[in-house]
Image (cartoon, rainbow, N blue to C red):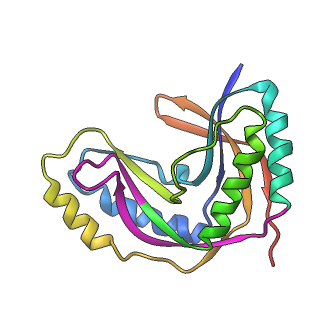
Amino acid sequence: MAIRSFLAFELPSEIREQIAKISRELQQSSLPVRWVKTENIHLTIIFLGSVSEDTIDDIKEKSGAVIERFSAIKIRLNGIGVFPNWRRPRVFWVGLDGEIESLSNLRNELQIELKALGFKPEKRPFRPHLTLGRFKSSLDRDEELKWILDRFHDINSNPHHLNELILFKSDLKPGGPVYTKMAAWPLTMD
């Protein structure tokens, strides 16, 4: 049986609360966006896709070996935007800054280890972000989007530590995805 899965960090409660507030404000707009439930917002490091149940133990072993080499990573919220651009938006996101190089190194080392299990490394540069929503259709009123991007472009938060990498199982349900922890690895605090 295949298990849809990914490696991610849950957000510290203070950041989650700030994201919830921003998301509530954005949902007042008339933009054609399918908003992500706040409790489902996390920082994905690697999306693994559909994985054979037999491979899960190997993923756990290789991920655990990588995590031992890392300590907790400090991040903070930094701005809001859309991928790929405001003229053709697909994804609404909140950006992150802080120890992004450490986060990128973690992702790269995980990709190297998981490549041995047949996972293809992501070719695009790592741009850590939190997905707030996905556009359901193209925009008629891009002025509203520009106004929102201007209004929220300088949002930020206090720094917080990401201190536990999690292997999540994702079950797609009619009411939205349901995420279940399959394994977790703590990062040491310096």
Task: Please provide percent x and percent y for residue 67.
Answer: 80, 58
58 versus 163 height, above or below: above
Image coordinates of residue 136 in percent, x first then y, are 29, 39
Q: Is residue 13 above or below residue 42?
A: below
Please identify the quadrant where the N terminus is shown. Answer: top right
Asked whether 33 or 112 is in front, the reply is 112
Identity of the residue drawn at 54% across and 69% down:
15
> Image point 68% across, 23% down: which residue?
2
| Res 50 quadrant in image | top right
Q: Residue at x 53, y 60 (%)?
A: 128
Foreground pick, 155 / 87: 87
Where on the picture, by quarter, is residue 171?
A: top right
Question: Which range of residues does the magenta coloring cover?
Answer: 69-93
Residue at the extreme front of the image, as rendered: 123
**Vertical placement of 88 versus 175: above or below?**
below
Instruction: Tell me the residue at 47%/69% (across/down).
Output: 18
Residue 35 point in image, percent of width and height = 38, 48
Q: In screen coordinates, is 98 left or right of 78?
A: right
Q: Quadrant of residue 61?
A: top right
Does the magenta segment cover residue 154?
Answer: no
Is residue 70 rendered to the left or right of residue 7? Answer: right
- Assess whether residue 79 is covered by the magenta stretch: yes
Looking at the rendered image, the quarter that the C terminus falls into is: bottom right
Q: Position of residue 80 (x, y in %)?
A: 37, 65
